[in-house]
Image: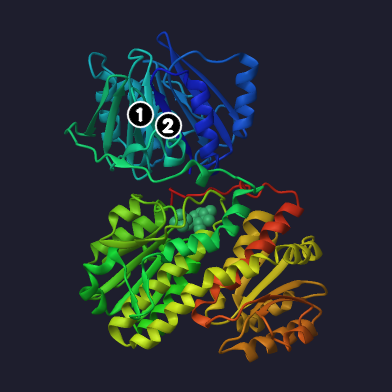
Amino acid sequence: MCGIVAYVGSKPAQALLIEGLKRLEYRGYDSAGIAVMHAGRATVVKKAGRVANLEAELASRGPLAGTMGMAHTRWATHGGVTDLNAHPHRDDKAGIVVIHNGIIENYASLKTYLMDKGHRFVSETDTEVLAMLIGELYEGGEGGLEAAVQAALREVTGAYAICVMCEKEPDTLVVARKGAPLMVGIGAGEYVVASDASAIVAHTTQAFPLDDYNVVRITRNGFRTSTTTNVAVTPKVMQLELDLEQIELGRFEHFMQKEIFEQPAALRNTMRGRLQAEDGKVVLGGLSALAKQLVRSRRVILTGQGTALHAATIGEYLLEDLAKVPAHAEYASEFRYRNPIIEDQTVVVAVSQSGETADTLAALQEAKDRGALALGVVNVVGSSIARETDAGVYLRVGPEIGVASTKAFTGQVAVLALISLFLARRRYMSADQCAAMIREMQSIPGKIERVLEQDERIKKVAEKYCERENWLFLGRGYNYPTALEGALKLKEISYIHAEGMPAAEMKHGPIALINDGMPAVFIANKGRQYDKVLNNISEVRARGGHVIAVATEGDAEIGKVAEDVIYVPEIDEPLSPMVTVVPLQLIAYHAAVLRGHDVDKPRNLAKSVTVE
Ligand code: G6P
């Protein structure tokens, strides 16, 4: 939720930290702050608002000297969006400075304990409690800060990724993690710590992710990794596979726009090496060792939040339809708390772009504890969910920076289609049928390109309706989740109220909302329920609603009932959401831009929700 970057080395820290913050701003952007250590003093500067506000403040003060420091971009959990509540936070005793991502759940009782000890708090945050606790436990001496952090973390419940400095140990940075991502990049005589790789790759490609309960003490001479109980740990250093180009805008105005347009290339990457049309085979390296177990599975539960849940719902249809295995998709936040029954031979599939969503991770752990085999459909390599699963298939769509998920959605649907075919072929599907589906899969990137070519026309549709405050998105079958996703995209970035639902459900209440001029977007491509969708369109028209239809090229009927039609190439229904969603993404994008919103940083949202 929040972005963390820290530096230990010989270069001036401030410029490097601000550059890192800009790369991380998509993780949270309601306030930003920095602390730089110099001559035994940590100077803290923090401001509510975007990183640009912090930069302006720093410019007016003159640059901070120092070659070690840390910076933070915040998404508020405890305490409002104010300068005081922004990170870093200090203690009032030992010269401790802390930045933190996550939530300290027992902060209230710790705060009472610390207040009884005479500590005075200036902010409303749980992070300040952590800073005070570390200060209270700090005993000085060699490794004093490391020991104090370990001791404090043994008292804490909740989730955290933290960086800590201490004015009494001005050459030491201590970082730790439980339940929120953090990695240490190892350069030549320097270290860059960050909540994700995008703030590291400009400096080094060697890095190691922290495991839960890991604490790393870093100085310019090296680092030591241990647990909160001070057991030494050997970290697994890996090569970051991320190009700077992938995290830069290039010719696009927004990351969301870039990522919508990247979908054909991203999906080609998702499928590369995984499809063998000649043999009617899907090859998934991550699943091959478990193939026998998976083929015998009796139930699949797919879980996720937001866009990932919409993709998971399409996965439910695909698995039942193609692989003939009972499947259902469910919000991770509901699943984890409702005492679910996990029968023998159940597989749980966690779907997540970031691999860090707190509810999805917890649902996965709950299902594993109850005996399920755990699979991940994840984009970020080495993320918490990826590490927690027994096996999985990565999306390979590249880093997604726009807060509104786009290419991850099509990537998730593509991977779920691959998994369905992988199982289908081993259960009931013939090689010929599978080969036909594979060829259809291979045609998708080209078909998305044909939709993207209509960007200008789709923008005109957005222009026509973007002032309307209430929209409906309606679809049936495989495109019911597409309707949910279209509505979510519009809500997230344009702040227009939109509801997505099965087209038939409209008659059971929402039809009462339809008045003169309300836009209703129908996904009306050719499929099993096409005629029924046409009926629903007529029902909306009869009540004065405006119909925007996403329809199949060559459909002569649809123009007679819908005012605006966006044509997409013909595609097999089970795979069609990967194509039909694209006009909906573009409508949302253009509507938000036309309404003057910051598309990549929509209000109140965060890219990755690591709190429940
Ligand atoms: C947040 C994001 C959504 C995303 C959801 C799940 O709400 O704003 O875009 O769909 O989290 O994220 P995940 O990383 O698990 O796919």
Identify the residue position indicated by label 2 in the image: 203
Residue nearer the viewer, 202 or 507: 202
Identify the residue shown where x is 63% and y is 31%: 52
Residue at the outermost top position: 39
The relative height of residue 605 versus residue 591 in the rendered view (above or below) is: above
Q: Secondary structure at mark 2?
A: loop
Identify the residue shown where x is 51% and y is 51%: 400
Residue type, numbered disc 2: His
Task: Say few, some or many: other residues with alpha carbon within 10 Å of mark 2 (under 14 / 14 to 19 / 20 or more).
Answer: some
- The percent position of residue 315, horizontal first and vertical second, equals 43, 73
Mark-to-mark CA distance, 1 and 2: 7 Å
The image quadrant that residue 171 belongs to is top left
- Given contact means CB atoms under 8 Å apart, are the residues at marks 1 and 2 in contact? yes
The relative height of residue 1 versus residue 333 in the rendered view (above or below) is: above
Identify the residue position indicated by label 1 in the image: 187
- The percent position of residue 252, horizontal first and vertical second, equals 64, 49
- Left or right, 253 with respect to 299, comes to right
The relative height of residue 281 versus residue 54 in the rendered view (above or below) is: below
Residue at the outermost left position: 231
